[in-house]
């Protein structure tokens, strides 16, 4: 759809179903053009389209003809002509939400990376862009974050949008009072156009997307996934190594709890002749679901206890932090795992000249600071690439291609 229709939708419920304020609320009724084109048109079969008000049947999800009234499950929707269309959109983005790495295929990945390169040009232009002017992004973070939250907020502002933010929603939001995630999402979507959420529970992002009538981006859900990190990781690998097919990648550290390596493994499986090495203390070995998935996709993988041997073979050494917060009260297991595999000058000496060291950050002592000066240390360039990927996703989810 090249242009948005010049109409807004006003809706009213049967008497007694809701208050007068709710009847006239642009956001909460979900009958406006923005959300219909986002969440309904052409997406009947998407597992990420889950707003309960529009799940009754396929016919109920179609736009009504302008100038006509239509009742759908107790909702009266009327198209009202306006002189000025509310916004202009391009061809609809294939995804309604960004929840997990399995949503992406090679074609979508390549297209996103092209948009990210355009976003890099926008960032270098001091005047920036105003393509998202008038849009509001809510960042709802139930776990601490520096890079992810700030890069999303920077991305939105660099495109002309505004930000509503909650940094520690687990303690300083109504969640501390016992409010359910679903109720929080229903409330926040009334204030914003897109939600970026980090949560401590695996699967929370999918639950939020099933509730929301606006796009939801998973910024990390416990030990589950971190899809936007995986996108920026693959983008970084392509820019640093020059290819994605035929590469060898060593995933090192906390592979059992590392949502970044799980999402990255899913994306690497989209490419040909990739081999993945798993290097981790036994207590945090990669889980079987990822191994089984890679096997089913024809991706060769191998477990190794020798980081030097793996570093000698790989194009990418992807180091991760042993995550103290995932061990609960088992401090003994954390201490057993911590410090076993460290990227230092010895590792650099055996790495190929073209190879790179990556890390999702923050780091503790798993990469020594003297590695930073080596041109193969790509982790700060990697973090910077996160801005461009997230700018691209915000543009695509809100405006389309």
Image: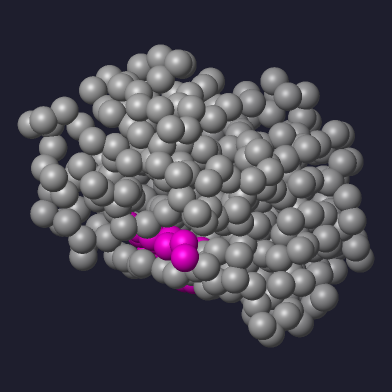
Q: Tell me where residue 6 appears, x and y as whole percent.
A: 53, 46
Q: Is residue 140 magenta?
A: yes
**In this view, 139 is above or below 14:** below
Q: Tell me where residue 354 appears, x and y as whole percent.
A: 90, 63
Magenta stretch? 134-151
Viewer-proximal residue among 165 and 14: 14
Which quarter of the figure is the N terminus placed in? top right
Location of residue 9 (image quadrant): top left
Q: Tell me where residue 271 appears, x and y as whole percent.
A: 80, 36
Can I make out residue 206 in this image? no
**In this view, 138 is above or below 230:** below
Horizontally, residue 245 falls left or right of residue 308, namely right
Horizontally, residue 394 falls left or right of residue 351, namely left
Viewer-proximal residue among 308 and 114: 114
Viewer-proximal residue among 336 and 199: 199
Q: Tell me where residue 244 appears, x and y as whole percent.
A: 84, 46
Residue located at (59% from left, 71% from top): 130
**In this view, 291 is above or below 20:** above
């Amino acid at each position: 759809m090249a242009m948005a229709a010049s109409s807004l939708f006003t809706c009213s419920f049967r008497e007694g179903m809701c208050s007068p304020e709710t009847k006239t609320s642009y956001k909460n009724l979900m009958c406006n053009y923005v959300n219909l084109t986002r969440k309904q048109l052409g997406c009947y079969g998407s597992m990420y389209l889950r707003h309960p008000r529009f799940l009754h049947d396929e016919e109920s999800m179609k736009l009504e003809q302008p100038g006509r009234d239509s009742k759908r499950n107790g909702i009266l929707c009327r198209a009202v002509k306006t002189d000025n269309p509310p916004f202009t959109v391009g061809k609809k983005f294939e995804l309604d939400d960004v929840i997990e790495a399995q949503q992406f295929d090679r074609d979508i990945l390549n297209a996103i990376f092209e948009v990210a390169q355009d976003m890099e040009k926008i960032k270098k232009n001091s005047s920036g862009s105003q393509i998202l002017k008038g849009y509001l992004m809510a960042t709802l973070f139930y776990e601490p974050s520096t890079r992810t939250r700030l890069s999303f907020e920077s991305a939105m502002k660099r495109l002309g949008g505004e930000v509503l933010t909650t940094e520690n929603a687990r303690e300083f939001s109504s969640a501390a009072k016992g409010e359910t995630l679903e109720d929080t999402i229903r409330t926040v979507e009334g204030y914003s156009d897109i939600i970026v959420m980090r949560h401590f529970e695996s699967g929370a992002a999918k639950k939020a997307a099933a509730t929301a009538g606006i796009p939801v981006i998973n910024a990390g859900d416990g030990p589950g996934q971190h899809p936007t990190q995986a996108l920026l990781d693959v983008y970084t690998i392509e820019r640093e190594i020059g290819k994605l097919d035929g590469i060898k990648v060593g995933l090192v550290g906390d592979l059992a709890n590392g949502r970044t390596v799980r999402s990255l493994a899913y994306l690497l499986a989209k490419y040909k002749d990739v081999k993945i090495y798993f290097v981790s203390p036994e207590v945090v070995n990669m889980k079987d679901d990822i191994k089984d998935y890679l096997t089913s996709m024809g991706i060769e993988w191998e477990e190794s206890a020798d980081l030097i041997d793996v570093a000698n073979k790989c194009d990418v050494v992807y180091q991760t932090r042993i995550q103290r917060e995932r061990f609960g009260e088992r401090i003994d297991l954390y201490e057993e795992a911590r410090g076993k595999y460290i990227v230092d000058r010895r590792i650099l000496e055996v790495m190929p000249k073209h190879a790179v060291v990556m890390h999702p950050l923050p780091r503790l002592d798993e990469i020594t600071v003297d590695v930073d000066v080596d041109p193969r240390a790509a982790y700060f360039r990697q973090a910077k690439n996160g801005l461009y990927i997230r700018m691209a996703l915000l543009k695509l989810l809100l405006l389309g291609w």
